[in-house]
């Protein structure tokens, strides 16, 4: 089995020092970029939500047609799953991810419990966006482009945090599983995004056909 891309990026920042564990620059940049994109998506959705509260007739810029309609999403009950607008969670969570990534780029190392904490946060995030995906496709019957961006980055954060933790033994798995994860780390997100795209395509196939 050939060396994975993640193994090839092993640097001093990846190695354990005492009880602390660092990470390579590719993973750090992924945290920074995904966190920044998630923050942007959360900010835009929150901003448009405030405008919608001021003016019930306001139409968000990403409401392009009956299917891609951010307004429908924002007006739904699911958009306030915890009693306040969902993107406010992102306004807190994604900047934290950016800070972690910047810290790693600066040479920071964290204890195992810290990385497990990040993993727990991404598990909550990916579970929440999966629920929102289902609600968007089958109950609200609309898509939000900014929400979709949040879905994409949250999935990437969850998976590559898991890869990092498996790589360093923070999450214990059999040696064969670890080797497979490191070698074929790209397979899971590709399949995951592919399934979501297929669900969107099949859900509104009759509408997409009219655009061809």
Image: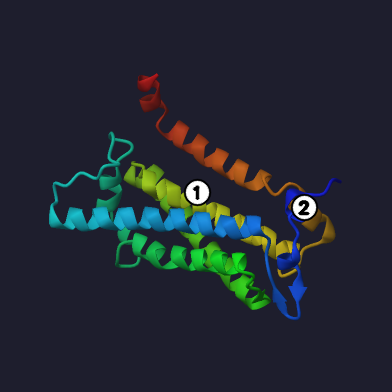
**Camera-nearest residue between 43 and 145:** 43
Q: Position of residue 75 (x, y in %)?
A: 24, 52
Secondary structure at badge 1 equals: helix
Q: Picture quarter containing residue 31?
A: bottom right
What mark, if any, has residue 4 been given in the picture? none
**Residue at screen point 36% across, 42% down:** 143
Q: Residues within 10 Å of mark 2 (few under 14, many from 20)?
A: few
Q: Residue furthest bottom?
A: 18
Secondary structure at badge 2 equals: helix
22 in relation to 63, above or below? below
The quarter of the image holding the C terminus is top left
Q: Picture quarter containing residue 118?
A: bottom right
What mark, if any, has residue 8 been given in the picture? 2
Q: Position of residue 105 (x, y in %)?
A: 60, 64
Q: Picture quarter containing residue 120?
A: bottom right
The answer to the question of whether label 1 and label 2 lie on touching residues, with beta carbons closer than 8 A, is no
**Camera-nearest residue between 4 and 210:** 4
72 in relation to 87, above or below? above
Q: Is residue 17 visible?
A: yes
Q: Which residue is mark 1?
A: 152
Q: How many marks?
A: 2
Q: Is residue 159 left or right of residue 90?
A: right
Q: Nearer the viewer, mark 1 or mark 2?
A: 2
Q: Position of residue 58 (x, y in %)?
A: 17, 47
Q: Earlier in the sequence, mark 1 or mark 2?
A: 2
C-alpha separation, residue under disc 1 versus residue under disc 2:
25 Å
Q: Is residue 119 left or right of residue 201?
A: right
**Residue at screen point 64% across, 70% down:** 107
Q: Residue furthest front?
A: 106
**Residue at screen point 36% across, 22% down:** 211
27 in relation to 103, above or below? above
**Residue at screen point 61% across, 42% down:** 190
């Amino acid at each position: 089995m050939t060396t994975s891309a993640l193994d090839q990026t092993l640097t001093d920042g990846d190695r354990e020092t005492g009880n602390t564990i660092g990470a390579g620059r590719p993973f750090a940049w992924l945290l920074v970029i995904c966190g920044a994109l998630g923050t942007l998506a959360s900010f835009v959705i929150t901003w448009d939500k405030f405008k919608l509260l001021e003016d019930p007739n306001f139409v968000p810029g990403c409401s392009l047609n009956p299917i891609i309609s951010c307004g429908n999403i924002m007006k739904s009950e699911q958009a306030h799953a915890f009693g306040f607008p969902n993107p406010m969670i992102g306004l807190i969570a994604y900047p934290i991810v950016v800070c972690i990534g910047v810290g790693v780029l600066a040479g920071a190392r964290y204890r195992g419990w810290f990385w497990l904490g990040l993993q727990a946060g991404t598990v909550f995030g990916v579970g929440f966006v999966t629920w929102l995906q289902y609600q968007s496709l089958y109950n609200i019957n609309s898509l939000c482009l900014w929400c979709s961006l949040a879905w994409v980055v949250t999935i990437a954060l969850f998976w590559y945090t898991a890869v990092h933790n498996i790589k360093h033994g923070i999450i214990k798995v059999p040696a064969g599983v670890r080797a497979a994860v490191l070698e074929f780390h790209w397979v899971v997100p590709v399949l995951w995004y592919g399934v979501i795209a297929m669900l969107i395509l099949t859900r509104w196939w009759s509408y997409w056909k009219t655009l061809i």
